[in-house]
Image (cartoon, rainbow, N blue to C red):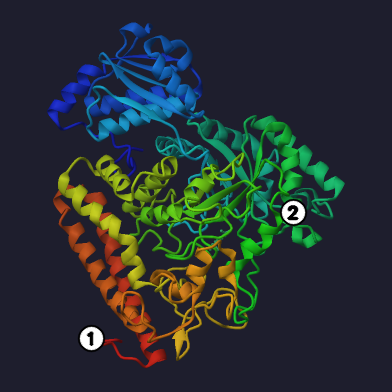
């Protein structure tokens, strides 16, 4: 399959700028490849195919490097082409570090591992798609984060939990797909932005998926691992904590029970027999009805360590999710607070986990809302490996119908200063492992792709989030603007008007989405279950009723202060604790996340809460109308298929925004009895 919508950002469109094209054609004629590992072969293939489509010429292979115009491969043999300084700089970088050098008309791409060479090749191809000069290239790059992972939430029946692009590319009708071409292409896209780990099944592991770690499925999973390996990506599986019971009918899954421990030891040995470089397990335990160590009065360190021990001989990892909370708790009782749960469960266990366990923590303490505080657990366990979890899938941010470019949100989270070890203790540094010197750390995210949609992500523009996720976690210093521009040019070609207009659309889209949905950090207000469209009092699990926002006739918001609320604010280090706890200091955008305030409370932006709600909701809707105008202005510059795809989604977004605006405004008008100062119609 190959089409503009399918090719995402690897379009490799013919270069239109003739000077640039001539320059490339002259430089890129012959290739020498050193090494034949699968990743090197992938690099060679990508390079030759891409050059052919971009320049219309096939590069020929050379058997000696002196006569080749491009040389790629392991450093050992080609070091004679490099200066001592180049070699020294490469040696200072980590295993995935690479260089791309131009020297007297020759391009040299090398790195500290085979995968690094592939990353280097993608660097060159990106430069070419962006039509950049190759003369005097001297690039030295290494990823900031060790783990750069995607989590698929795909089920064997072909559905994808929180999937907004149709069915799974991995499974169909209860079986692993036979034709794995699409998986291979997915691996290509991921490697082009530096992803190096993937888990291929839903964190909620149902009955049949529990058998993924048995010989019923392992031979085919091995094939998938082979595909990803050729792109530098290590395969992981989500597991059912109660597997010994589900698979082998044991009477317990108690992590301290010797037979259970032996069972896992044998099981893990079996997996490595099939996949010698298997990455490890992702575990969702004691959360939303999934089994876990609590059943046996054990803690999460007991659970994780049992698996970690069994993985030790093979170098495997246990990625243990901290999304652990009692979903049946009575939300009306203000002494309990879901936001507190992860920290309360895990912080006391610091230092108790084996060194091959990594805790995976959602970016916020709740659940991927359009805005929430940063999880205070990140960085709070100096002696336990941690990684942060983002959601590329837009579960609560428009479900790939509404436009919501998430890079500005992720940037803000990564730049958040926790002050855990003084100023500069940002989330970016913590998950990169530079603050507490973790053995393993990094970033994971829930993927947003599916296979029904040939364009992978439902909304073509949602591809920007997948691209941006990879680029940002490789280099968190890149700005959301830079990443957007890279993506636009590679996806739609080098046209100023598209870059400007679409760039603006993407960069404002998060704020726009926030404007017409849940205000001031309060979150939720979505239709329970589906999480799309407004349902202001909708509360997912409670059998007692209740809301997430505590709106009454006097005010709105969740009191999480230490004096009168849930005390969640105490989980932050100072000065953040005081910043959030003190209503007069708390930033506007998070005010209702931390405080219950009267409708006439004045925000720092000088508006009352109620007026702010009205204004942002009217504005958000108008901004969506403007997005439509902007997109329509690009009609002649974008191919019809992709143009229509986005146009159609924007129309749906407009309906959604209208519904949100009207429901929110009416709800708060009725609750508060305070009229809009501008007397706009509130239905
Ligand atoms: C959210 C999401 C669930 C998912 C869960 C998780 O609650 O709605 O579908 O299973 O997160 O992260 O485990």
Q: Which residue lies furthest to the right in this view?
A: 258
The reply to whether residue 139 is in sight is yes
Residue 678 has which mark?
A: 1
5 vs 556, nearest the viewer = 556
Residue at image coords 63%, 70%: 327
Measured as percent of width and height from the top left, residue 191 is found at 44, 35
The Cα atoms of the two marked residues, 2 and 1, are separated by 59 Å
Q: Is mark 1 on a helix, strand or loop?
A: loop
Does dot 2 land on a helix, a strand or a loop?
loop
Crowdedness near tag 2: few (<14), some (14–19) or many (≥20) residues, C-alpha within 10 Å: many
**Spot occupied by residue 194 in the image (x, y as percentages of width and height):** 44, 37
Which residue occupies 60% across, 69% down?
A: 338
The N terminus: image quadrant: top left
Q: Give coordinates of residue 24: x percent, y percent.
A: 22, 23
Which quadrant holds residue 83? top left
Q: Residues within 10 Å of mark 1 (few under 14, many from 20)?
A: few
Quarter of the picture holding the C terminus? bottom left
- Which callout, 2 or 1, points at the residue further toward the start of the chain? 2
Depth check: 380 or 245 in front? Answer: 380
Q: Name the residue under label 2.
A: 242
In this view, 268 is above or below 641: above
Disc 2 versus disc 1: nearer the observer: 1
For the point 62% across and 61% down, the residue is 342
Q: Quadrant of residue 666?
A: bottom left
Ligand 1 lies under 8 Å from the Cβ of mark 2:
no
Q: In terms of depth relative to the viewer, which is nearer, 430 or 53?
A: 430
């Amino acid at each position: 399959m190959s089409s503009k919508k399918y090719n995402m950002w690897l379009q490799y469109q013919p270069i239109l700028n003739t000077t640039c094209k001539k320059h490339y054609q002259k430089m890129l004629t012959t290739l020498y490849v050193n090494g034949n590992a699968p990743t090197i072969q992938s690099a060679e293939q990508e390079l030759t195919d891409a050059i052919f489509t971009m320049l219309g010429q096939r590069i020929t292979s050379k058997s000696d490097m002196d006569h080749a115009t491009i040389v790629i491969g392991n450093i050992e043999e080609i070091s004679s082409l490099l200066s001592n300084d180049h070699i020294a700089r490469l040696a200072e970088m980590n295993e995935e570090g690479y260089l791309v050098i131009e020297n007297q008309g020759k391009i040299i791409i090398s790195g500290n591992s085979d995968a690094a060479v592939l990353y280097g090749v993608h660097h060159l191809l990106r430069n070419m798609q962006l039509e950049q000069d190759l003369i005097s290239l001297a690039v030295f790059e290494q990823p900031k984060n060790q783990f750069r992972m995607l989590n698929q939430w795909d089920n064997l029946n072909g559905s994808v939990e929180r999937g907004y692009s149709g069915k799974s590319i991995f499974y169909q009708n209860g079986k692993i797909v036979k034709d794995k071409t699409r998986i291979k292409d997915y691996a290509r896209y991921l490697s082009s932005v530096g992803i190096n780990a993937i888990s291929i099944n839903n964190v909620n592991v149902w009955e049949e998926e529990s058998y993924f770690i048995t010989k019923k499925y392992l031979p085919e999973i091995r094939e998938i691992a082979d595909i990803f390996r050729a792109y530098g990506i290590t395969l992981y599986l989500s597991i059912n904590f109660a597997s010994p019971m589900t698979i082998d009918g044991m009477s317990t899954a108690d992590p301290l029970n010797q037979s259970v421990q032996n069972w896992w030891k044998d099981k893990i040995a079996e997996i490595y027999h099939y996949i010698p470089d298997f990455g490890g397990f992702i575990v969702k335990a004691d959360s939303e009805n999934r089994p876990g160590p609590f059943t046996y009065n054990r803690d999460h360190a007991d659970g994780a360590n049992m698996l970690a021990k069994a993985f030790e001989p093979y170098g495997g990892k246990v990625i243990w999710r901290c999304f652990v909370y009692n979903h049946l708790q009575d939300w009306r009782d203000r002494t309990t607070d879901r936001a507190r749960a992860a920290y309360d469960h895990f912080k006391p266990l610091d230092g108790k986990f084996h060194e091959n366990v990594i805790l995976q923590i959602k970016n916020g303490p709740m659940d991927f809302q359009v805005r929430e505080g940063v999880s205070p657990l990140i960085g709070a366990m100096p002696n336990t490996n941690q990684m942060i979890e983002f959601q590329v899938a837009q579960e609560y941010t428009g479900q790939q119908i509404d436009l919501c470019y998430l890079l500005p949100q992720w940037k803000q989270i990564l730049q958040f200063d926790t002050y855990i070890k003084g100023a500069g203790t940002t989330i970016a540094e913590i998950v990169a492992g530079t603050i507490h010197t973790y053995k393993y750390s990094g970033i994971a995210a829930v993927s947003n792709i599916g296979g029904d949609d040939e364009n992978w992500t439902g909304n073509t523009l949602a591809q920007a989030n997948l691209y941006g996720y990879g680029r940002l976690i490789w280099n968190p210093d890149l700005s959301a603007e830079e990443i957007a521009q890279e993506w636009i040019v590679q996806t739609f070609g080098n046209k100023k008007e598209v870059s400007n207009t679409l760039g603006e659309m993407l960069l404002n889209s998060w704020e726009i989405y926030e404007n017409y949905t849940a205000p001031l950090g309060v979150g939720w207000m979505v239709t329970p279950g589906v999480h799309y469209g407004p349902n202001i009092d909708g509360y997912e699990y409670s059998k007692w009723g209740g809301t997430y926002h505590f709106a009454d006739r006097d005010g709105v918001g969740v009191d999480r202060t230490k004096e009168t609320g849930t005390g969640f604010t105490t989980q932050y280090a100072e000065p953040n604790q005081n910043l959030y706890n003190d209503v007069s200091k708390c930033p506007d955008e998070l005010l209702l996340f931390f405080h219950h305030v009267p409708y006439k409370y004045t925000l720092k932006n000088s508006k009352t809460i109620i007026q702010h709600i009205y204004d942002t909701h009217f504005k958000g809707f108008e901004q969506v109308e403007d997005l439509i105008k902007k997109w329509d202005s690009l009609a002649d510059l974008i191919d019809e298929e992709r143009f229509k795809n986005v146009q159609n989604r924007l129309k749906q977004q407009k309906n959604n925004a209208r519904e949100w605006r009207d429901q929110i405004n009416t709800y708060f008008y009725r609750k508060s009895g305070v009229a809009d100062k501008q007397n706009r119609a509130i239905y």
